[in-house]
Image (cartoon, grey):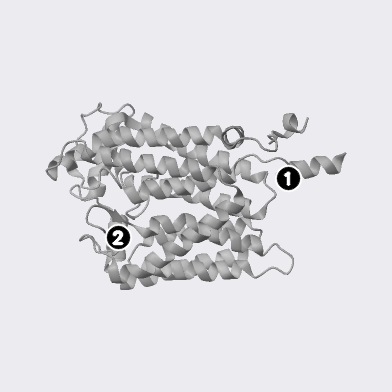
Amino acid sequence: MTEMVFGTVPVRAGDPVLPRWWRTIDKWALSAILALFGVGMLLGLAASVPLAEKNGLEPFYYVKRQAFFGTIALMAMLGISMLTPQQVRRLGVVGFGIGMLAILLLPVFGTDFGKGAVRWFSFGFASVQPSEFLKPGFVIMAGWMMAAAHEVSGPPGRLFSFAMTVVIVLCLALQPDFGQASLVLFSWMVMYFVSGASVVPLIATGGLTAAGAVFAYNNSEHFARRINGFLSTEIDPRTQIGYATNAIQEGGFFGVGVGEGTVKWQLPDAHTDFIIAVAAEEYGLLLVLVIIGLYALVVTRSLIRLMRERDPFTRIAGAGLACAFGVQALINMGVAVRLLPAKGMTLPFVSYGGSSVIASGIALGFLLALTRSRPQGEISDILARRSR
């Protein structure tokens, strides 16, 4: 009766892992994630061929690499999604420790690949951007700290998480990587709100963020150049934003046709930061709306399931992961249509990039694990017992 009313899925003792996982996983969110990866491969076929030819490589070099990294990401996502919340917390804390150590070592061993920001470790055959892997670990770590504050005589977890967030944001801003820094700060603010804390500290944090932005504008040429370009009333058609804006306008509702787009030949980052411009030009607004709908489905389904959870850690960390995933997608698409300053942020699970797609797979694995249905794990179960 409880299952019929509240949707709780019973789990029998000794039940095999795979059948139990299949009954409890959010199949709608999982399907949307797989569809996003499929869209990413489709767009990679269109966007990465010109870059491969420009670099003297075989036409589908980057597509094959994306398929390889994507396979690793999907395997990691599915494996992690089978974990319990306790196992997710342990893995996330270990991942956070490794990611934080890597961030601290970037000034010594990192490289900028000529882009003016030291964000990567180069190993010759591949490169790694540690900030991508730090994000899911950070959300899990911060969620654990905030959940601990709900316990009787628990530590001041919110304060500890805030101090940790400040350190991470400063490390990222010094690279400089203001996009990832803002995403980390946003994730913390979401979790802080979900944990039931007062709104006043959030307002104060917003004020400090604004003051930090003013300071960065006055002291960072990199930051000021992007803000000035965003605020300019005229768009230079020879810039990445200019090419992307023109491509989106040319695409219309149905696009110019598969393979007929030109922006992929003009943009050096067409397969990464501006992949949505390729989608809009060749497939039109129709595909863009489908992509937005898939991201919205993952986020809304996850938040709805988390609202029924009574475990503080699951609610807080899950909300942080879901909102970070959705907001990163919004930032990427917002930059392409000039609603936001350029930030150099990928479109999760769609853009090309080993670090991006594998880190997204880990984060989504955490999210799917935390949103699995659990017997007697919902607030509605408590209310049902009290009403009897």
> 234 or 67, which is in the foreground?
67
Relative vertical location of residue 334 with respect to residue 17 in this rendering, above or below: below
Question: Residue 281 — which label?
Answer: none
Residue 370 visible here: yes
Question: Of the residues under marks 1 and 2, which one precedes in the sequence?
Answer: 2
Asked if residue 49 is positioned above or below residue 136 in the image, the reply reads above
Q: Residue 379 shows which numbered tag?
A: 1
Q: Amino acid at mark 1?
A: Ile
Q: Quadrant of residue 10?
A: top right
> Which labelled disc corresponds to residue 120?
2
Identify the secondary structure beneath mark 2. loop
Amino acid type, callout 2? Trp
As rendered, which of 203 and 56 lies closer to the eye? 56
**Residue at x-position 43% and y-position 34%:** 34
Q: Residue at x 38, y 72 (%)?
A: 215
Instruction: Residue at 31%, 73% (x, y): give it.
Output: 219
Which percent across, then down, holds residue 251?
Answer: 28, 32
Please indicate whether residue 166 sits to the left or right of residue 67 in the image. Answer: right
x and y, in percent, of residue 205 in the image: 53, 67
Residue at the right extreme of this rendering: 388
Among all residues in the image, which is located at the extreme front? Answer: 14
Label 1: few (<14), some or many (≥20) within 10 Å?
A: some
294 or 95: which is nearer to us?
95
